[in-house]
Image (tube, rainbow, N blue to C red):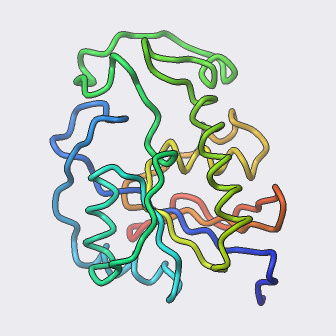
Amino acid sequence: MTLSRAQKLLTFIRHAPSQPNGFLYGRSDADIGDILPNIISFLQTQITQGSLIICSPAKRCQKTCDIVLPHAICRQTHDELWEQSFGDWDGVAFSLLPDIGTLTGKELVEFSPPNGESFNDLCKRVHLILEHICLNEKAENITFFVHAGVIRAALALAFGSQIAALKCEIDTLSVTKLRHLGGQDFSVMSVNKSAHK
């Protein structure tokens, strides 16, 4: 199938595992470890040649892009593509985080950590930048190096449901693909594809 002028292929790659592990990273700027050669090769096959490359400003996304695409000097970086802010919990060890109990899907979408933002807040900023990019960039193939929360926010745009998007697993170094059909319409092509699946 040939893409029409209005359609774009959006490829989302989640960054490599954060280092040190065991901590909640949102706006905390964590580093990453090495990426195995077979995973690099897999990710390279998922990126259409000539794609516009767009990254979160986070070190873990920028360095993942550097490793996967070592010759991709030109890339865009957008602050709106940062991971969800977890406020006072950002950078805290998982073992020290409070137990918030069982939340319904609606409650989880609206829940904000102290001085942080909710998934709903994240979706609002991610949806605006994605719609802007899709409507204003001429490239038909766009590859994003971003975070799990950002990818789920993109899926929420396609599903028309934030609750459904939060049920999607997004592994590190996985690939999720959407198609922009024009306007505010998106379809889901694949979710959480990895070198191991």
Horizontal arrangement in the rendering, residue 146 relative to residue 71 (left or right): right
Please determine whether, in this image, residue 137 is positioned above or below residue 83. below
> What residue do we see at 27% from left, 52% from top?
59
Please determine whether, in this image, residue 21 is positioned above or below residue 136. above
Instruction: Report x, y in % for residue 113.
Output: 45, 16
Question: Residue 141 falls in which quadrant of the image?
Answer: bottom right
| Residue situated furthest front in the rendering | 136
Horizontal arrangement in the rendering, residue 30 relative to residue 42 (left or right): left
Horizontal arrangement in the rendering, residue 129 relative to residue 170 (left or right): right
Instruction: Report x, y in % for residue 178.
Output: 66, 64
Question: Residue 188 falls in which quadrant of the image?
Answer: bottom right
Horizontal arrangement in the rendering, residue 3 relative to residue 170 (left or right): right
> What residue do we see at 40% from left, 25% from top?
86
> What residue do we see at 30% from left, 57% from top?
16
Tell which of 155 and 170 is nearer to you.
155
> What residue do we see at 64% from left, 62% from top?
133
Numbered circles on residues, count = 0
Instruction: Report x, y in % for residue 165.
Output: 65, 42
Quadrant of the drawing holding the C terminus: bottom left
Tell which of 133 and 22 is nearer to you.
133
Instruction: Report x, y in % for residue 52.
Output: 52, 76
Question: Residue 104 falls in which quadrant of the image?
Answer: top right
Quadrant of the drawing holding the N terminus: bottom right
Please determine whether, in this image, residue 101 is positioned above or below residue 18. above
